[in-house]
Image (cartoon, rainbow, N blue to C red):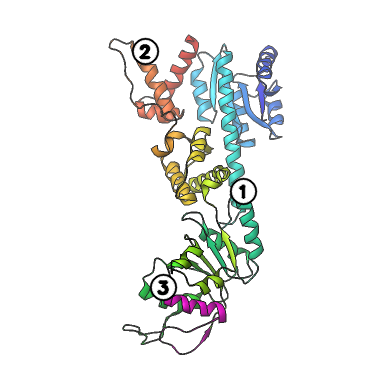
Amino acid sequence: MAVLLVVDDEEANRLALERIFVRENYEVRTAADGRSAIELLRDGAVGVVLTDLKMPGMSGLELLKAARQLAPDTQVIVVTAYGSVETAVEAMKEGAYDFVTKPLRKDAVVHSVQKALEKFELVRENSRLRAQIAQVSRTEMIGASAAMRTLLEEARQVAPSRASVLISGESGTGKGLLARWIHELSPRRDRRLVTVNCGAIPEALLESELFGYEPGAFTGAQGRKEGRFDLASGGTIFLDEVTEMPLLLQVKLLRVLQDGEYERLGGTRTLRADVRVIAATNRDAARAVQEGRLREDLDYRLNVIPLHVPVLRERREDVALLARHFVAGHAARHGRTIVGIDSEALAALERHAWPGNARELENTLERAVVLARGESITLADLPAALRGGVAAPESSWLTFAVGAPLAQVERRMIEATLRQVNGDRTLAATLLGISARSIYRREAEWRDES
């Protein structure tokens, strides 16, 4: 567990705070001045600093600035006397997580430290994830479930060989990513991986796309065109949705697999194919043979090494890992500061059946990253379909009784707006048409009143 560091030049205050947080099961360290606190910050174990603002020597504000340099993930809460709100606002601008006013109320200070520690854990987890992503190639497969570990081990064993591979699995499970991963682990990694979606190219064009053509092969064929097998020479060709390939063309593909030979459309010269073939289908191959969609002899040749990518609903333990990976990637891509996913949102993601598998999960989280109003993905950032069975987020409407005191109306409006923007006081102030300083001042007054 991360350490709470209490910094105060008054011994009585330090001891009182230490007793409070030890009883709350926190690991607490104390320092009598800013310089001693800096030495404790250097070991990297401090998650939250609770520091007095007015101290001889190094002030709490100076300690805050030093902490931002030494331990940028550490969250700092400043303690100030009532009437010094402007100084507290300055501390918030310098990066303080929160401020609490004297005389301290136990509930308020414990709540503030708890929230700061949660943010520290989120930021640290996000930093670890970004570091992992930086070390992983863009083709790395993500999965820690037993099914994925088995699949990846089989793929790793297959990669160095020349054997044909047939990858099966529902749409969106990552068959193309697995094909690329196998290619990256193979001796052919320095040559091309050429992808052909057999279901997306019209039948009349697919043969010329695969094998190329010679001048005069058909009307309009004025020059020679290399096919995908030419382009993949020395590398790998990935035939996606291979069961959508016309049966007559399957005969020519079978020849490539058996003899390593083919001719361009309209040509007479036999060419050699030094190509490793990886195919994929979202159909059951045996059923495709029975239905006449896939030649049985081609199935034998393609299906030398069968690999099946499990659906996401059968490996729910991978959802959190994939979700954090997608959030980190899309946050960087869209220039958003998103430090993680909160527990409610993560639980909703893990409950969903994901008929579109990992592709649907990624699209959902890219949307959430773009639309997120806070520093983490919350339940409110997810589509309505994923929020089913969970208490709906607070309504964006407030109602007041006629004659309600203006102070009460103001407080409810400010507190509701802060909840809607996940505590972002600057954004809340912009929405309300007031200054952030006004919000800090009102919060200080409410704490005093209670």
In percent of width and height, residue 265 lies at 42, 83
Image mark for residue 132: 1
Q: Which residue is mark 2?
A: 407
* Amino acid of disc 3: Pro
Question: In the figure, 323 relative to 93: above or below?
Answer: below
Nearer the viewer's eye, disc 1 or disc 2?
Answer: 1
Q: Determine the secondary structure under disc 2.
A: helix
Classify 10 Å Cα crowding around label 3: few (below 14), some (14-19), many (20 and above): some
Residue at position x 67%, y 25% in the image = 5
User: Do the residues bearing badges 1 and 3 touch, measured as CB atoms within 8 Å?
Assistant: no
Residue at position x 54%, y 21% in the image = 99
User: Do the residues bearing badges 1 and 2 touch, measured as CB atoms within 8 Å?
Assistant: no
Which one is earlier in the sequence, the residue at label 1 or at label 2?
1
Q: Residue furthest left?
A: 402
In percent of width and height, residue 399 lies at 32, 19
Q: Residue furthest front?
A: 290
Query: Could you say which is closer to the camera, residue 377 or residue 243?
Result: 243
Rendering quarter of residue 51:
top right
Which one is earlier in the sequence, the residue at label 3 or at label 2?
3
Magenta span of residues? 245-271
Q: Which residue is mark 3?
A: 246
Q: CA distance from mark 1 to mark 2?
A: 49 Å
Q: Look at the image and tell me whether residue 227 can be seen.
A: no
